[in-house]
Amino acid sequence: MFKTTTLLLVTATLSLGCSHSSDNDLRLSTSKTTNTPYEANWDSVKTHETPDWFTDAKFGIYFHWGPYTVPAHKTEWYSMWMYREGHPIRQYHEQTYGPVDEFGYKDFIPMFTAEKFDPTEWAKLFKDAGAQFAGPVTEHADGFAMWDSALTKWNAANMGPKRDIVGEMAKAIRAQDMKFIATFHHQWKYSWFPTWDENTDAFDPALEDLYGPKVPKGTFNLKNMTQADPLPDQKFNDEWLAKIVEVVDKYNPDLVYFDNKMDIIQEQKRLEFLSYYYNHGAKRKQDVVVTYKFHDLQEGSAVLDLERSRMSEKKAFPWLTDDSIDWNSWTHVANPNYKSANRLIDFLVDVVSKNGGVLLNITPTAQGEIPQPVRDRLLAIGKWLKTNGEAIYGTKPWTVYGEGPAEVIEGHLSEHKNKDNSEKDVRFTSKGNTLYATVLDWPTETIKIRALATGQFNVNSVRLLGTEEKLQWQQTPNALIIQAPKTQVGEHAFVFKIS
């Protein structure tokens, strides 16, 4: 297992055709013994190890789906912007549905019908896409729980679909032999709605369970709260923790994901969750994972997750990135802007070469349908993985992550700044004696891999996954030179298996 606390750069090398380090060496394991039961302090929870299933899985799917999907307009943040005076979404809402004191967010819930929702069919699609783990957004910032909750009446089993979405998906996903994940964003509920504004339905004390506690006017939707801002009270902190514990107890997720802004929650509550969940997993002999963003948890206590971004260099520790299939929205909208399958596959290859994994968000409709363009992209990824998955699943980073002119711009929400790759861009992964060199577009010219020049590595064979064509190749003092294959195989990234 990888230790999440590992900070050293990967130094393991792969000797092709010669003696080499073992897979266990490449894992950068430590000899530190896990201490259980875990206690609610950082030293204790940092002894938790990231399980092998996560470091091997590489690819998962989740979905933003809830009452905010009903208007299908612009963004999943509709539920917040509809209350912001002067905002274009506020104007759209008033023109379409009426004033926010007469038609508030709560009134979308009966319209969230999900009558075409088929968890078995969805899970099969995720499996066909090559996902190894999957699950729903369990609660977004809107206060609406997607599971059968005893803690709030505002839940999908009681209202809207009147179905236990989380429970049904957990069963269906596990039936497809995938790991089940639950994602939480509900710390954002604090100050998401203008509970101070008596001209909106969010002001109604009877709706506090949905819209959240009363907050001062200046607190409304602060993305980055300062020490001068009022933090959530004890009741909010207790409810935040109770909801996660309820989901853990009812559905036993293999991974619990947190959106950012978790730093507004009391540190002790965050620690109480980590120790509770890690102990829960240990008692069940279940290898569990927690992800976090920014500095919301201490380094080494869980897996770092990025949002709509990736690393520019290889990391010694396993990490995750979550991104949406839509360039602009995390939920279904009337005018989607979907990423191409080629872009999604290249993104996956690049992330995996740097010791990361991808959690891809998809966008079902309020009725419970997955749009055909989304299906097409998922099946294209699955088709590619069926041929090339051995270069992704269960692999380890190589000495270098790749070569080529493409440069990755790091930073929160930065993915749109990164350009598409070309045939000059190569990414590496390794497994035992095998090195996989993935060329990110069809090679029309001779391939030159400089990292595989003679002197360090002895290449015994080179073949292109998906074809039996015999390739012409030569190892020189400057590069491994591979003549461009005669016949193109597939439509996306092309994997050369080197042993």
Image (cartoon, rainbow, N blue to C red):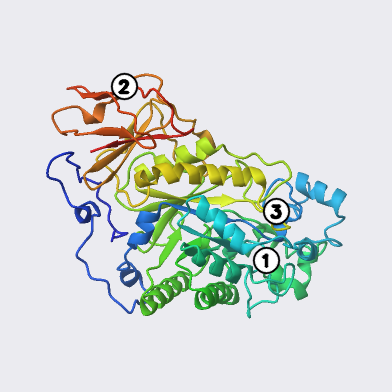
Visible in this render: residue 61?
no
Report how far apart the C-alphas of labels 3 and 1 lie in the structure. 32 Å
Residue 50 placement: quadrant: bottom left
Visible in this render: residue 283?
yes
Q: Can you say whether 314 is above or below 22 in the image?
A: above
| Residue that mark 1 sits on | 215
Report how far apart the C-alphas of labels 2 and 1 lie in the structure. 66 Å
Report how far apart the C-alphas of labels 3 and 2 lie in the structure. 47 Å
Q: Is residue 35 left or right of residue 20?
A: right
SS of the residue under disc 2: loop
* Mark 1 neighbour density, 10 Å: few (under 14) some (14–19) many (20 or more): many
Amino acid carrying label 2: it is: Gln
Q: Is residue 31 left or right of residue 44?
A: left
- Does label 2 or label 1 sit earlier along the sequence? 1
The quarter of the image holding the C terminus is top left
Report the front residue among 265 and 250.
Answer: 250
Residue 255 position in % (x across, y down) = 45, 64
- Does label 3 or label 1 sit earlier along the sequence? 1
Residue 365: give its label.
Answer: 3
Q: Given contact means CB atoms under 8 Å apart, are the residues at marks 3 and 2 in contact? A: no
Residue 492 position in % (x across, y down) = 47, 34
Residue 468 placement: quadrant: top left
**Foreground mark, 2 or 1?**
2
Residue 365 position in % (x across, y down) = 70, 53
